[in-house]
Image: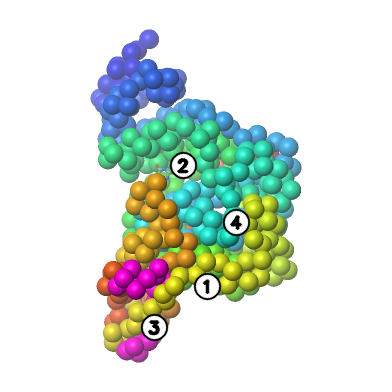
Amino acid sequence: MATLVELIAKKRDGGSHDPGEIQRLIQALISGELADYQMSAWLMATFLRGLEPRETLELTDAMLGSGVVLDLSDVPGVKVDKHSTGGVGDKISLPLAPIVAACGVPVPMVSGRGLGHTGGTLDKLESIPGFRVDLSIADFRRIVREIGTCLIGQTKEIAPADKRIYALRDVTATVESIPLITASILSKKLAEGIDALVLDVKVGRGAFMKDLDRARALARSLVDVASRGGKGVTALLTDMDHPLGFAIGNALEAAESIDVLRGGGPRDILELTLDLAAEMLVLGKVEADVEGGRRRAQQAIDTGAAAEVLRKLIAAQHGDPRVVDDTSLLPRAKVVQTITAPRAGFVVDVDPLALGYAGVELGAGRTRADQAVDPAVGLVLRAPKGTEVRAGDPLIDVHASDEASFARVSARVASAFRIDDARVARGPLVFEALRGSGSSAP
Ligand code: URA
């Protein structure tokens, strides 16, 4: 049998691992037989040489198998989740999970926190007074069964190998590898005990993948590996070259999500939510096609059924469900200042990355995983791309903890906008869909 060093050398030299070899490496990492510096060498070799889809599946399985896989077999129906690769103003999980659950498809969702310029679902949920994301697995299972959805944080039992490997990738410049990202995302998502998964792969300046070719390659890899793993899977490639919706910041995004469930909210949030819900309802086998899925999802909003699921979910997770009917109960920033247009014209660009980092600087996000966030602060876009403005018209509201904090970010926020003489319309929200061949049987 090859030694661990020989396995590292094999990948370094561009070889393909035999079945079982990647399992051995991951098990050796967990047992302590393989040191972090050896794993780092293998990660760099993999970053440079790549993995075949078969190898990526083995890595995913090995990382998944390093922890528990939730057994949701006592929850009837096809369990479907959604994962987004992350963006600015991306609060879609908040309206989406209640809508899909209201349509009869269970949504067990293990979510993440914001890191870097992107926000995280858990931080947005925790802005709701009392809301807890640190539930036991038993409570998670019970709430999914009773209400149809539950949203919690990653426990230490879920894919611990990913946690170890991600920490190494972060400091060895090996994050941006398609097979490594694929195994990292899927090992965590498949640990939820789901039957199918919808992926929102973001493209643009506010996303991990800046161009369509790279995003498409990641989407293909995710769809291919999830299908090989026997899961139903669809990936949508969606725009992240403009913030999603108007709100950036935790309580502001929670309020905007509630607006969507009450029949209002920004058009792009509603449209993307309906598109993703439709794919989940098809994979969940309650609708035959996405047109039917969109109609059914819209009905769940119109009848109030989705808002009612959100009330129950918030109550079950120890939060105050009255926020669904009165968003003024959410935390509010002390200072709200408006940045205005310096000249007349059309807003031709709103840079999501600049606004994402401004949100972090205000305290809505974090630059290190152990930092706390301020739930109240953030930004509310008043003039998205395509808006005609006069000099002095509002571009964006800054919600800050104090005047000094506003002063620190105002130049950066203003620099996110470009105003010109000719109108430039926003492009499509969804570029394309990739559908897998997995079964999605419960
Ligand atoms: N998100 C993950 O969970 N893992 C990665 O490797 C990248 C993004």
Q: Secondary structure at mark 2?
A: helix
Describe the element under mark 4 as helix, strand or loop.
loop
Under mark 1, the amino acid is Pro
Which numbered dot is residue 394?
3
Q: From which residue to which does the magenta span run? A: 389-407
> Eyeballing the image, is 229 above or below 6?
below
User: Residues under labels 3 and 1: Cα distance?
Assistant: 17 Å
Of the residues under marks 4 and 2, which one precedes in the sequence? Answer: 4
Task: Name the side, left or right, on which 332 lies relative to 47.
Answer: right
Mark 2–mark 1 distance (CA, rounded to whole Å): 29 Å
Residue at point 39% right, 23% down? Answer: 29
- Crowding around mark 2 (Cα neighbors within 10 Å: few <14, some 14 to 19, many 20+) is some
Q: Is residue 296 visible?
A: no
**280 magenta-colored:** no
Marked residue nearer the N-terminal end (2 or 3): 2
Q: Earlier in the sequence, mark 4 or mark 3?
A: 4
Instruction: Tell me if the residue at label 2 has its CB under 8 Å from ligand 1.
Output: yes
Q: Residue at x 44, y 72 (%)?
A: 334
Which sits earlier in the primary sequence, circle 3 or circle 1? 1
Give 198 or 69, whichever is nearer the viewer.
Answer: 69
Q: Which residue is mark 2?
A: 185
- The percent position of residue 432, horizontal first and vertical second, equals 47, 57
- The amino acid at mark 3 is Pro
Quarter that holds the C terminus: top right
| Measured Cα–Cα span from mark 1 to mark 4 | 27 Å
